[in-house]
Image (cartoon, rainbow, N blue to C red):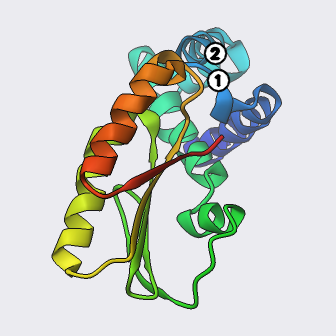
Amino acid sequence: MDITEIKKAIALKVYQKADELDWCHLTIPERQRQYENWTSDPDIGGKLAEIMPVNRVRVYLKDTVLRQYSKKHKASIVQLIDSLNIKYDAITRMYEKPEGILCDGLNFYTTTAAKDWKSALASAFERAYLTGHKRENVLIITDHIVGRFVDQEYRELIEDAASRLEISVVWLN
């Protein structure tokens, strides 16, 4: 087996285990434990250590294998707004980082993980401001079931900041 085949086989093993663990909904400490498990597993970390420095194995799993997994399993902005039964006739423009969409030339929707709410809120405001015309500006926040985001007062702080910028917030599980 060459290096590419080894990496591909390991990625498939990790993806299968990530599916079993419901990776996208694990907390940071749970993910950290799993990285350690994979790193010390002879069939995963052991094999990777044969083709790369040992101190790069965990980084490779986290930043390459699982980043690709997370991207494949993350709903797109179009899927998210469709799941919220938001009606639109046409997509006028798509945005990246944070992912966003302008529908019908008037309605902005931006999606972000809760931990990145500040930069996403600023981007949502800036995009609407630069366009000059908007009817609706919505920030859809995901991945908010852990940490300070379960605290209602903290959510109210975020919602207050958003309302001052004429942005509504949707908390999506």
Q: Secondary structure at mark 2?
A: helix
Along the viewing direction, whichever of 155 and 94 lies nearer the viewer: 155
11 to the left or right of 32: right
Along the viewing direction, whichever of 162 and 123 lies nearer the viewer: 162
Q: Are marks 1 and 2 in contact (CB under 8 Å)?
A: yes
| Amino acid type at image mark 2 | Gln
Q: Position of residue 157 (x, y in %)?
A: 34, 30
Question: What is the quadrant of the C terminus in the image?
Answer: top right
Q: Secondary structure at mark 1?
A: loop
20 to the left or right of 10: right
Question: What is the quadrant of the N terminus in the image?
Answer: top right
| Amino acid type at image mark 1 | Leu
Identify which residue is drawn at 72% across, 38% down: 15
Along the viewing direction, whichever of 19 and 39 lies nearer the viewer: 19
Residue 111 vertical placement versus 82 (above, below): above
Neighbor class of circle 2 (other Cα within 10 Å; few <14, some 14-19, many 20+) is some
> What residue is disc 2 on?
34
Along the viewing direction, whichever of 97 and 18 lies nearer the viewer: 97
Identify which residue is drawn at 25% across, 49% down: 164
Distance, label 1 to label 2, CA atoms, is: 10 Å
Identify which residue is drawn at 59% across, 70% down: 78
Q: Position of residue 166 (x, y in %)?
A: 30, 58
Identify which residue is drawn at 19% across, 70% down: 129
Residue 68 vertical placement versus 147 (above, below): below
> What residue is disc 1 on?
26
